[in-house]
Image (cartoon, helix red, strand yellow):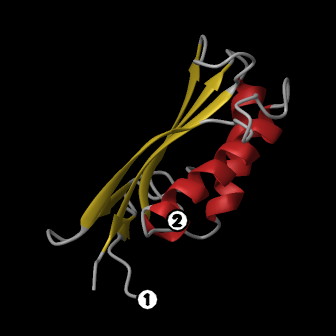
Amino acid sequence: MNRAITLIRSASLSDVAEYAYAATVPADARLIFLAGACPLNDDGSTAAVGDYAGQASKAVENMQTALTASGASLQDVISTRVLVASARREDLVAAWEVVRDAFADHDVPSTLMGVTVLGYKDQLVEIEAVAAVLDS
């Protein structure tokens, strides 16, 4: 499948970051703006209460469902923002590692942020994303 996304790296920037620094899509790409993927079960309860990695995994799963409904996949994501309700770097890293591993070598530009609180009871992780596809 022909992908719309070009990931951009720069030799002038550190290679420590586990993602591309920028991404582009052609003008004829269809952009898909996803609501923040939350770690909610089908019944609306929060999954993996108290578990940053478990909630990140459920949020990725829900994001994949929304992408599929939009005619896209993780490989069509152009950027992410991972929100983690914690001031502890270890908690942010636990969530990030799950997201990073889900995207594998499609290392889109990403932002990892610690926030004070998220919208659902017991929610610790939320993932925002934008995707782009070329319609045939």
- Camera-side residue of 48 and 84: 48
Can you say which quadrant of the picture contains the C terminus? bottom left
Residue 18 visible within the image:
no
Q: Along the horizontal axis of the image, is 6 left or right of 70?
A: left
Furthest residue in direction front, as rendered: 43
Badge 1 crowding class, 10 Å Cα cut-off, few under 14, some 14 to 19, many 20 or more, is few
Furthest residue in direction left, as rendered: 27
Instruction: Say which quarter of the image contains residue 8.
Output: bottom left
Which residue has dot 2 on it? 68
Query: Hey, what amino acid is under mark 1?
Result: Met
Residue 72, percent from left and from top: 45, 68
The residue positioned 84% from the left and 26% from the top of the image is 49
Residue 26, percent from left and from top: 20, 71
The residue positioned 73% from the left and 19% from the top of the image is 88
Q: Sequence-wise, which precedes: disc 1 or disc 2?
A: 1
The residue positioned 65% from the left and 54% from the top of the image is 100
Residue 134, percent from left and from top: 29, 77
Q: Along the horizontal axis of the image, is 114 left or right of 39?
A: left
Which residue has dot 1 on it? 1
Instruction: Say which quarter of the image contains residue 84.
Output: top right
Query: Hey, what amino acid is under mark 2?
Result: Thr
